[in-house]
Amino acid sequence: MATLVTFHAHPDDECIACGGVMRKAFEEGHRVVLVVATRGEVGEVDDGFLDDGEELWERRVAETHEAAEILGAKRVEFLGYHDSGMMGEPTNDAAGSFWTADVEEAAQKLAAILREEQAEVLTVYDDNGGYGHPDHIQVHRVGVRAAEIAGTPRVYQSTMNRDHMIRGMEAHAERDPNFEMPDIRERENFGKPESIITAAVDVTAFLKHKRTAMRAHASQISEESFFLAMPDDAFAYSFGTEWFIREGQGPGITETDLLAGL
C-alpha cells in the first residue's frame, strides 16, 4: 500500500487537523507517519498538572505518541525546533525557534524522512497556516520545499473551510438567540473560502478515534475545551470533514480521498 506522511507544528495539531485521514489511511492498510516540527514547549498548563521535575515538552511528547497510536501512525518523528508561540510574541525570534529556522535546512530534514519512507502523500498546512500561527506558516513553507526535494508526488494543504464554519454558526444562532457569532467573518486569515478548496474527506466514521486522540493531549485539550465540550452533533459538523487544497486540482472539490488509486 502507500505511505502517508503528515507534518504538523505542535503536539495535538495532528488530531485536530488530520486525525480522521490518518485513521482512515491506517484502516485501509496504508502506512502512516507523523512528523512534528516542535515539542510544544510554550503551551500552558495549570499549576500542579505536571509531575515534580517534569518538563512540559516531555508530557507533550508522551501525549503525541499516545495519540499517534490511537490514530494509527506507525512512526513519530520530531524535527527538534522550539515552539515559536503565537504571532507577535517574543518567542517568535528566540534562538532555535521554528519560525527562525532556515527553510532549506528544515526541508532537508523532512525530505530525508520522506525519502526513507518513500512517501507518496504529504500533508502540510495552507500558506497562512490555517489561522496565521508562525509555526503553521513555516510548516507550509518547509513542507512544500521538502516535497520538492524528495519528489513526493502528492502534497495536500490542510485548511479550514470558512464558509462551512460560518454556515454552522449561523444555523446555531437561529436555534439559540443568545448565541454570539464569533468574529470569524471579519478574520480573512482564518481558513480558506470554499471556492479554492479542492479536497473534502468524510471522516465521520473515525470521529471516535479523533476525539479520543484529542483527549490524549490532556495538557492542552481539557474536557471543558471547545473541542471536547461541544455536543456530538456539533462535533460531527465541525470535524467530520477534513479539508485540503492540492495544487493543480479544482476548481471545486475534485477529491474525497488523499490516497485514492495508491
Image: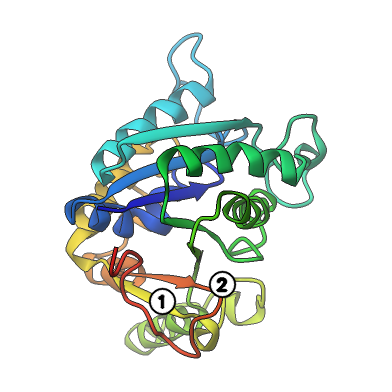
Location of residue 191 in the rendering, given as x and y in whole percent from the top left corner: 56, 72
Dot 2, crowdedness within 10 Å: few (<14), some or many (≥20)? many
Instruction: Examine the rendering and report whether any part of residue 72 can be seen.
Output: yes
Q: Nearer the viewer, mark 2 or mark 1?
A: 1
Residue 199: which disc? 1
Q: What kind of element bears circle 2?
A: loop
**Would you identify the image quadrant in which residue 100 lies?**
top right
Separation (CA) of disc 2 from disc 1? 14 Å
**Left/right of residue 68 with respect to residue 144 in the rendered view:** left
**Left/right of residue 148 with respect to residue 120 in the rendered view:** right
Q: Is residue 127 above or below residue 151?
A: below
Location of residue 122 in the rendering, given as x and y in whole percent from the top left corner: 47, 55
Q: Where does label 2 land, which residue?
A: 191
- In the image, what residue type sits under mark 2? Gly
- In the image, what residue type sits under mark 1? Ala
Q: Residue at x 53, y 18 (%)?
A: 55
Dot 1, crowdedness within 10 Å: few (<14), some or many (≥20)? many
Q: What kind of element bears circle 1?
A: strand
Sequence-first disc among 2 and 1: 2
Q: Residue at x 60, y 82 (%)?
A: 185
**Left/right of residue 32 with respect to residue 106 in the rendered view:** left
